[in-house]
Image (spheres, rainbow, N blue to C red):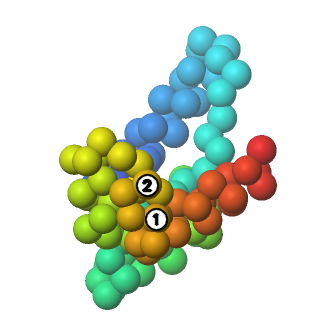
Amino acid sequence: MQPDFLSSVGLGLLLDRLDYLKGELEFKIKCLGVVFTRVRGHVAFHKETMERLPHEKAFKKLHFFKTVIPENIAISEAPMSAKPIALYDGSASGAEAFRALATEVLGRL
C-alpha cells in the first residue's frame, strides 16, 4: 500500500472484507502482511505514516513487512516494455527491493 491516508482507509475496508469472507462465507483466507510501496523517502508524511500505521488499533494484528518498495522510474517503465523489473533493470533500487521482499515473504510461508 502507498503510505497515505486514502490507502490506510482502503486497508481498513480490505480487512473488513476479509473478516466477512472468513466469518460469513467460511473462507480459509488470511492476510500475509502489508507492504509499503511507491514510497518517497524524502517525504515526511510517508515516513510518519509508515511509523504510525502499525501501532494503530485497527492494524495491530497485521504483519508489516520491513522491506519497502521505493517510488522508482524503472518500476514505472518496466510494464511498458512488457518485462518484469528484474529483467528490465535488475540493478534498479526497485528491483533490489522486490528481491528483498520475495525473500521476506518466503520467510513467512
The kind of residue on which mark 2 rests is: Leu
> Seen in the image, is 50 located left or right of residue 42?
right
For disc 1, the marked residue is 90
Compared to 43, does 86 lie above or below?
Answer: above
- In this view, the residue in front, 103 or 36, is 103
Residue positioned 51% across, 39% down in the render:
15
Mark 2 residue element: helix
Within the image, what quadrant is residue 85 found in?
bottom left
Compared to 36, does 42 lie above or below?
Answer: below
Binning the other alpha carbons within 10 Å of mark 2 as few (below 14), some (14 to 19) or many (20 upward) gives: few
> Seen in the image, is 90 located left or right of residue 7?
right
> Seen in the image, is 66 located left or right of residue 69?
right
Quadrant placement of the C terminus: top right
Binning the other alpha carbons within 10 Å of mark 1 as few (below 14), some (14 to 19) or many (20 upward) gives: some
Q: Quick check: can you spot residue 10? A: yes
Residue positioned 26% across, 68% down in the render:
73
Residue 34 is situated, as x and y percent measured from the top left of the image, at: 54, 54
Compared to 84, does 52 lie above or below?
Answer: below
Compared to 90, does 83 lie above or below?
Answer: above
**Distance from the alpha carbon under mark 1 to that under mark 2:** 6 Å
Task: Say the numbered circle drawn on residue 87.
Answer: 2
Task: Say the numbered circle drawn on residue 69.
Answer: none
- In this view, the residue in front, 19 or 71, is 71
Marks 1 & 2, CB-CB < 8 Å contact = yes
- In this view, the residue in front, 74 or 63, is 74
The kind of residue on which mark 1 rests is: Gly
Residue positioned 29% across, 83% down in the render:
43
- In this view, the residue in front, 82 or 68, is 82
Residue 60 is situated, as x and y percent measured from the top left of the image, at: 63, 59
Mark 1 residue element: loop
Residue 1 is situated, as x and y percent measured from the top left of the image, at: 41, 55
Residue positioned 31% across, 69% down in the render:
72
